[in-house]
Amino acid sequence: MISFVWRYKRLLGVGLFLGVLLTVFEVSGLRDHFNLAFIQQLILQHRIGGLMLFVLLFSLGNLIQIPGWVFLAAAVLTLGRVWGGAVTYVAAVTSCAFTFVTIRALGGDALRLLKNRVAVRILRELDAHPIASVALLRILFQTVPALNYALAMSGIKFRTYLIGTLVGLPVPIALYCIFFDILVTGMRVR
């Protein structure tokens, strides 16, 4: 048991950190503020400061399992499809970078210690095509926190992670922007 804990101490440390962070946000009631109405109000009341807070909240929200689409929807509904998408892109990239740096500092490349055949195969594929892999994962899963944690502990370089993120996020963000814009337009017609 002691050797297991010692071997996976960084992975366990990340789990403990995320558990404590989530508990603090849940118990304090702060997690309840991460909703569409609150984020819209924040952007509307404080144009410049609100956008900086939007980026900060997106980054924190990503760490505590708040889906990125909540932020995207708030931005598109408040700022429109183009500006909302642009602001969300900046916030999403910042959030992914923040999560990477935070989790890498705590967990290092802890996933490299796993001796599971599937994990070894996945990491080998990631090593063979790191930018393309990250970009494809971003297209499929956007800013899903679990993906960010896994990539941070995978051992890939930050530069590679960032380039893959920059390349992969525009397509899903653009599609979501169109979707939310159509949704809002449809609601106005009724």
Image (spheres, rainbow, N blue to C red):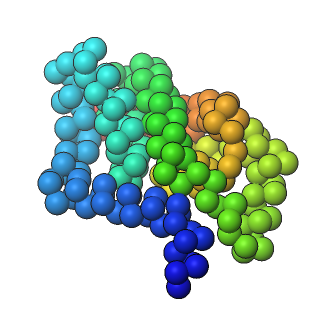
Q: Is residue 20 above or below residue 79?
A: below
Q: Residue furthest bottom?
A: 1
For residue 28, what is the image quadrant? bottom left
For residue 181, what is the image quadrant? top left
Q: Is 111 situated left or right of 27 in this image?
A: right
Q: Position of residue 70 (x, y in %)?
A: 35, 43
Q: Residue furthest top?
A: 48
Q: Is 106 situated left or right of 128 in this image?
A: left
Q: Position of residue 177 (x, y in %)?
A: 47, 33
Which residue is rendered at x = 52% and y = 81% of the image? Answer: 2
Which residue is rendered at x = 35% and y = 52% of the image? Answer: 64
Which residue is rendered at x = 39% and y = 38% of the image? Answer: 59
For residue 46, what is the image quadrant? top left
Q: Is 1 situated left or right of 112 in this image?
A: left
Which residue is rendered at x = 35% and y = 63% of the image? Answer: 19
The answer to whether residue 13 is visible is: yes
Q: How many marks?
A: 0
Q: Nearer the viewer, residue 186 or 69?
A: 69
Q: Nearer the viewer, residue 3 or 26?
A: 3
Q: Nearer the viewer, residue 10 or 174?
A: 10
Q: In which quadrant will I find the C terminus?
A: top left
Q: Position of residue 40 (x, y in %)?
A: 24, 31
The answer to whether residue 96 is visible is: no
Q: Position of residue 25 (x, y in %)?
A: 23, 53
